[in-house]
Amino acid sequence: MREASSFDLTLLVLLAVIWGSAFFNIKIATYSYDPITLALVRVIFASIPLIILCKLKKIKIEAFEKNWKSYALIGLCNIAIPFVLIAIGTAKINSYLAAMLMSTTPLSGSILAHFFIKDEKLTLPKSLGVLIGFSGIVLLFFDKIIVNSENYIYVLITILGSTFYCIGGLLTLKLKNKKNENVTTSTTLWSVIFLFPLSLLIETPWNSNPTLSSTFSLLYLGVVATGLAWLIRFRILTVNGLVFQTQVAYLIPIFGIIFGYFLMDEIITWRVLISLVIILFGIYIFKKNNKGTT
């Protein structure tokens, strides 16, 4: 993988801003939409501009061709499942807390990579970084203002959602030789296929009466935080590698806290700030000792 340029760093920060802003928009969208329907409408909004982009650039969409199983699996693990889990979790916790929990993705990813990627084994220093990072999450459970008996299960659900992102990231590496736009569009289309029947069978979207603000947030989540963000993510992943791409984890919780505090009036306690520092320090220790290039 090549050395990161100023353009690569700009894309990384832009991705962090987009994903950091996604959480308060998810929160707003959950006021009117059930989680599966929210995820479904989100990916539908995302797929439309992606399809148009592929048509304009004359890029073939390979969702239902030879590698359809890979596209389907990535669409399920990297989009459908985490979108639903994160929507369920964010509905009951602070939006910035969801952003903080998502920042542990590289730590969860390191554990999975240890078992599935030959050159990404956990060493003692890397393991120390993982333990430090997750200790910051554990500290949050002692802050009863933020995590309590009424919402702790939703914190765990959000963490599970981030774990599926890790799984999806590992699977995406198998398609790194495919065109960015094709992979993003194909996996998004498969997520629509998975979510559509579930939304109809489990929820009753035709009975909903969404507000304009929730719908606008959902539109943003689809077009910007999903369609555009996944294009940026896949470009970073294929050009700079998984290690560089996961650097976004440092920035997402910071932007998430800024948006949550100023736009959602969410309470921030001293334990939250200490937890954030511990989590980011753990990620730093892990990254400092991670020599992989995948």
Image (cartoon, helix red, strand yellow):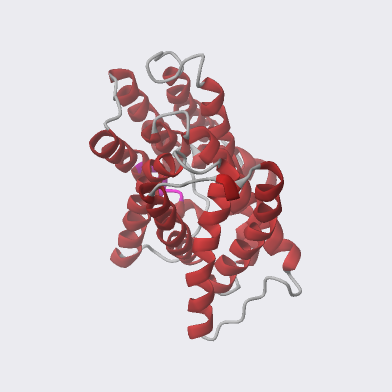
Q: Where does the image place residue 36, in percent across and percent down from the top left? A: 60, 45
Q: As displayed, is residue 213 above or below residue 279?
A: below
Residue 189 in sight in this render = yes
Residue under the point 45% across and 29% down: 133
Residue under the point 47% across and 28% down: 92
Residue under the point 48% across and 84% down: 56
Tell which residue pokes out farthest to the left in this image. 262
Q: Main secondary structure of the magenta part?
A: helix
Where residue 187 sits, quadrant-wise, is bottom right
Q: How many marks?
A: 0
Instruction: Point out the image quarter for the C terminus.
Output: bottom right
Where residue 6 sits, quadrant-wise, is bottom left
User: Could you tell whether 109 is left or right of 261 in the image?
Assistant: right
User: Could you tell whether 13 is left or right of 141 in the image?
Assistant: left
Nearest to the observer: residue 21 or residue 116: 21
Q: As displayed, is residue 145 above or below residue 178?
A: above
Nearest to the observer: residue 13 or residue 49: 49
Residue 294 in sight in this render = no
Nearest to the observer: residue 199 or residue 160: 199
Q: Where does the image place residue 142, in percent across and percent down from the top left? A: 43, 13
Where residue 51 sits, quadrant-wise, is bottom right
* Range shown magenta: 246-250
Q: Where does the image place residue 190, in percent across and percent down from the top left? A: 66, 62
Q: Where does the image place residue 278, in percent across and percent down from the top left? A: 37, 27
User: Could you tell whether 153 is left or right of 245 in the image?
Assistant: right
